[in-house]
C-alpha cells in the first residue's frame, strides 16, 4: 500500500495540474470505486460538476482536493467540501489527454476545464478496487493549524482524516505531542509508529527503514524509550521519507505510479526492507525477517539489538 512519500508524490503532481481548474463532467465507470459516497453516482457527479479545485492537501496517507462549488468561490470556515481520494492497494490518479485510450482498470473519469499545455482528464484507475473517491465535508482542525501539506494551507481538514496525527514532514508536527503519546503507550516501537493516532504516514516499509537508521529494535517497549531515542527515530523517519520523495517513492510493481504513470525508484536504496539474508550495509551481518502483525519486520540483529 502506498505510504506517505508515494502519496506526497501524487499530491505534488496533482497540485501542478488541477489547482484552479473546473471539473466540467464526471463519468463513473464502476460504482464500486465510489462506494464510500453513500448517495450514489448521480449525487457524486452532481457535487463535482462545475466545482473548481482549490488545492490538493495531504495528511499522512490521506489525500483530498478542497472544492469551490459553482457560484460560491469562497466558503465560510467549516462549511467546505472536498473530493477525497483513497488509493488503497492499487489506486492510481493519472492525468491524461482525451486521445489516450482508457486504461484497463479505469473506474472514474473527471474532465477538467482547458488549460494551455495541460492534460484535460483526471482518471482514477484501480485494479484491486480497494481504493475509491467520495465527496466529503471539511471541518476546522483541532489545533487551529493547517489541515495538512498543501500549496496554500488552510485550517480545515477532511472529516475522515481529522482523527489522525500529523506526520513527520508536516511543518506543524509536534515532537512533544508525539513523545507524550509514545510514553503513554505500553507497546512495541514499531506498533506505535504504525499507529496513525500517534504519528501518521509511516507504513511497514518506512518503519523498518527508519528503525534501522535509528539503530532501534522494532519490539523495543515504548515506555522504556529515552527522549533521545524518540527524537532519533523521528529524525530517521523524516530523513528516509525525504530521500524516498527525491526518488519518486518506492515501487515494487506497476501498481504504484505518479500522475504521469511513472514508478519511483527508492526500492534500489532500501537498507533492510525485503532484504532478509543480505548483509547489513553498516556491519555486514545478514538482515533478519520476523513475522509481525500478519506482515514482516526486517532488521539487523547486531545494529538493532533487542533490549
Image (tube, grey):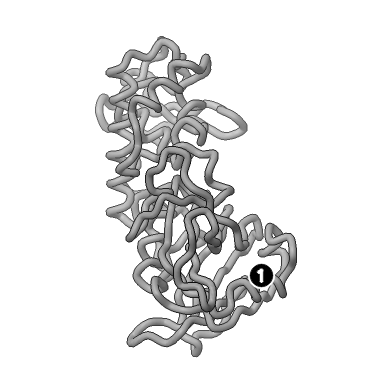
Q: Residue furthest front?
A: 76
Where disc 1 sits, the SS reads helix
Residue occupying the point 65% across, 75% down: 46
Q: Which residue is mark 1?
A: 44
Q: Residues within 10 Å of mark 1 (few under 14, many from 20)?
A: many
In-front residue for pair 119/291: 119
Examine the rendered structure and indicate whether residue 239 appears above or below residue 159. above
In-front residue for pair 9/73: 73
Horizontal side, residue 295 vs residue 37: left or right: left
Residue occupying the point 63% across, 71% down: 107
Q: Residue furthest bottom?
A: 99
Q: How many marks?
A: 1
Examine the rendered structure and indicate whether residue 28 appears above or below residue 271. below
Q: Tell me the quarter of the image containing the C terminus.
A: top left
In-front residue for pair 203/40: 40
In percent of width and height, residue 115 lies at 37, 85
Horizontal side, residue 226 vs residue 255: left or right: left
Residue occupying the point 56% across, 69% down: 124
In percent of width and height, residue 81 lies at 55, 61
Instruction: Tell me where residue 32 sits by quadrant.
Output: bottom right
In percent of width and height, residue 291 lies at 56, 27
Examine the rendered structure and indicate whether residue 130 appears above or below residue 211. below
Q: Say if residue 227 shows up in the picture.
A: yes
Amino acid at each position: 500500500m502506498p505510504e506517505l512519500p508515494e502519496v506526497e508524490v501524487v499530491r505534488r503532481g496533482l497540485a501542478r495540474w488541477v489547482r484552479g481548474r473546473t471539473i466540467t463532467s464526471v463519468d463513473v465507470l464502476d460504482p464500486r470505486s465510489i462506494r464510500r459516497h453513500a448517495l450514489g453516482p448521480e449525487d457524486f457527479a452532481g457535487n463535482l460538476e462545475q466545482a473548481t479545485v482549490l488545492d490538493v492537501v495531504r495528511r499522512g496517507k490521506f489525500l483530498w482536493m478542497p472544492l469551490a462549488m459553482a457560484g460560491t468561490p469562497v466558503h465560510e470556515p467549516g462549511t467546505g467540501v472536498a473530493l477525497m481520494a483513497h488509493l488503497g492497494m492499487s489506486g492510481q490518479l493519472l492525468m491524461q489527454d482525451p486521445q489516450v485510450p482508457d486504461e484497463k482498470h479505469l473506474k472514474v473519469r473527471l474532465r477538467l476545464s482547458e488549460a494551455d499545455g495541460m492534460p484535460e482528464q483526471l482518471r482514477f484507475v484501480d485494479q484491486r478496487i480497494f481504493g475509491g473517491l467520495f465527496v466529503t465535508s471539511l471541518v476546522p482542525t483541532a489545533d487551529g493549524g493547517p489541515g495538512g501539506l498543501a500549496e496554500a494551507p488552510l485550517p480545515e481538514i477532511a472529516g475522515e482524516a481529522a482523527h489522525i496525527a500529523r506526520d513527520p514532514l508536516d511543518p506543524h508536527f509536534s515532537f512533544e505531542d508525539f513523545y507524550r503519546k509514545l510514553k503513554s503507550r505500553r507497546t512495541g516501537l514499531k506498533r506505535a509508529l504504525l499507529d496513525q493516532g500517534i504519528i501518521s504516514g509511516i507504513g511497514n516499509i518506512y518503519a523498518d527503514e527508519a528503525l534501522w537508521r535509528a539503530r532501534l529494535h522494532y519490539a523495543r517497549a515504548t515506555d522504556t524509550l529515552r527522549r533521545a531515542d524518540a527524537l532519533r527515530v523521528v529524525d530517521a523517519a523524516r530523513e528516509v521519507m525525504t530521500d524516498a520523495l527525491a526518488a519518486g517513492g518506492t515501487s515494487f510493481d506497476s501498481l504504484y505510479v505518479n500522475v504521469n504513470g511513472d514508478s519511483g525508484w527508492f526500492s534500489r536504496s532500501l537498507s533492510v526492507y525485503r532484504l532478509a539474508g543480505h548483509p547489513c550495509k553498516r556491519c555486514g551481518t545478514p538482515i533478519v525477517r520476523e513475522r509481525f502483525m500478519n506482515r514482516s519486520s526486517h532488521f539487523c540483529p547486531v545494529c538493532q539489538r533487542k533490549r
